[in-house]
Image: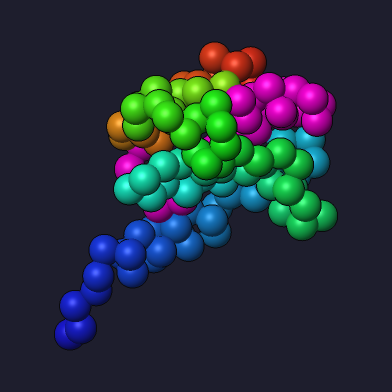
Amino acid sequence: MSVKTSPQRRLKRRRRVRAKITGTAERPRVSIFRSNRGISAQLVDDIAGHTLAAVSWTEAPLRDKAPMEQATAAGKLLAERAAAAGVTVAVFDRGGYQYHGRVKAFAEGVREGGVTV
């Protein structure tokens, strides 16, 4: 029996989640990536293979914030960009991470911004 590392276990969970979730043009997928330094996400139309909107922690308004504030602000910023792209409903892909902490704060920020997730 081989020992799996944390990233390997996360990718296994991610594949399991992705097998059940698909984004469309009307209801795109909010794909999230969380690192130790920050958080990034994008709205993806899986059928067409296009990214409709994206946000990253390296952007100027998010860079100097504390991690939880950064996640909430990133969610609100993605919701603004989603509204500009004409998206009001999306499906949330947690990317193999627990729905807890910064991932949860990001999802709540998106909801506060006006997108139903």
Residue 14 vs residue 115: left or right? left
Q: Position of residue 71 (x, y in %)?
A: 44, 30
Residue 48 vs residue 79: left or right? right
Q: Residue at x 77, y 52 (%)?
A: 50
Which quadrant of the rendered structure holds the N terminus?
bottom left
Q: Is residue 46 above or below residue 71?
A: below
Q: Residue at x 71, y 28 (%)?
A: 81
Query: Is 88 in the magenta?
Result: yes
Q: Which residue occupies the foreground of this view, 37 or 20? A: 37
The stretch in magenta equals 77-99
Which quadrant of the rendered structure holds the C terminus?
top right
Q: Can I make out residue 104 in this image? A: no
Query: Is 83 in the magenta?
Result: yes
Q: Position of residue 73 (x, y in %)?
A: 50, 23
Q: Residue at x 76, y 42 (%)?
A: 52
**Which image quadrant is residue 90 in?**
top right
Q: Is residue 33 above or below residue 105?
A: below
Q: Which residue occupies the foreground of this view, 53 or 100? A: 53
